[in-house]
Image (tube, helix red, strand yellow):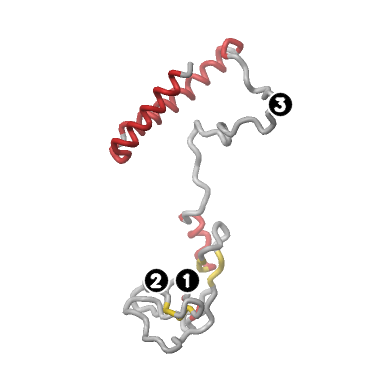
Amino acid sequence: MAASALTPHGTAFPEEGRCGYFVEKKKRFCRMVVAAGKRFCGEHAGASEEENARKRILCPLDPKHTVYEDQLAKHLKKCNSREKPKPDFFIQDINAGLKDETEIPDQLVPISSLSEEQLENLIKKLRKASEALHDALNDPKNGDSAAKHLKQQVCLSHSNY
């Protein structure tokens, strides 16, 4: 924590319902909201002696915030910094291009050389990707401009073949 003092230096008391921790570096009180009956926010709860029975530690997924040590397992399940599951059709760095322009990847093969099973798997992947695109196009949250952009991308990708 960048601050060291718990009392204000020539300033008023913290706003009601706000943290009572004085941030020395900013010369003001922390502006985070506190829980009912508490004096400090979750980040500065360790600054209070009456709340010092529980130890706060840095989150292992994101050291920008802290968590109670006894609640770490629960926190790791819901932390916004945890790794999210990737969709089936996601392939890391698929559009990154070649690392070395002179190398030709061994994985590029003509469709005509695929076995029937490999071709069926490819068709399944393409259908899944198509369903995901269709869902995105019909999702009202995306709005008109996003739908227009997605449709343009679909038209551009089809015109390249």
152 to 56, vertically: above or below:
above
Tell which circle, 1 or 3, labels the residue nearer the N-terminal end.
1
Residue sitting at x 59%, y 13%:
115
What residue is shown with label 3?
102
Given contact means CB atoms under 8 Å apart, are the residues at marks 1 and 2 in contact?
yes
User: Hey, what amino acid is under mark 3?
Assistant: Thr
Q: Earlier in the sequence, mark 1 or mark 2?
A: 2
Please identify the quarter of the rendering in which residue 98 is found: top right
Where residue 127 sits, quadrant-wise, is top left
What is the spatial separation of the Cα atoms under label 2 and label 3, in whole angstroms? 55 Å
Residue 83, how many percent across, how many down? 53, 48
* Residue at position x 42%, y 75% in the image: 30
Residue 71 falls left or right of residue 141: right
Q: Residue at x 37, y 73 (%)?
A: 34
Count the labels in the image: 3
Residue beneath disc 2: 32
Q: Secondary structure at mark 3?
A: loop
Estimate the x, y position of residue 107 in percent, counting from the top left.
64, 23
User: Does residue 26 appear left or right of residue 138 in this picture?
Assistant: right
Residue bearing the label numbered 1: 43
Residue 131: horizontal and vertical position, in percent?
A: 39, 27
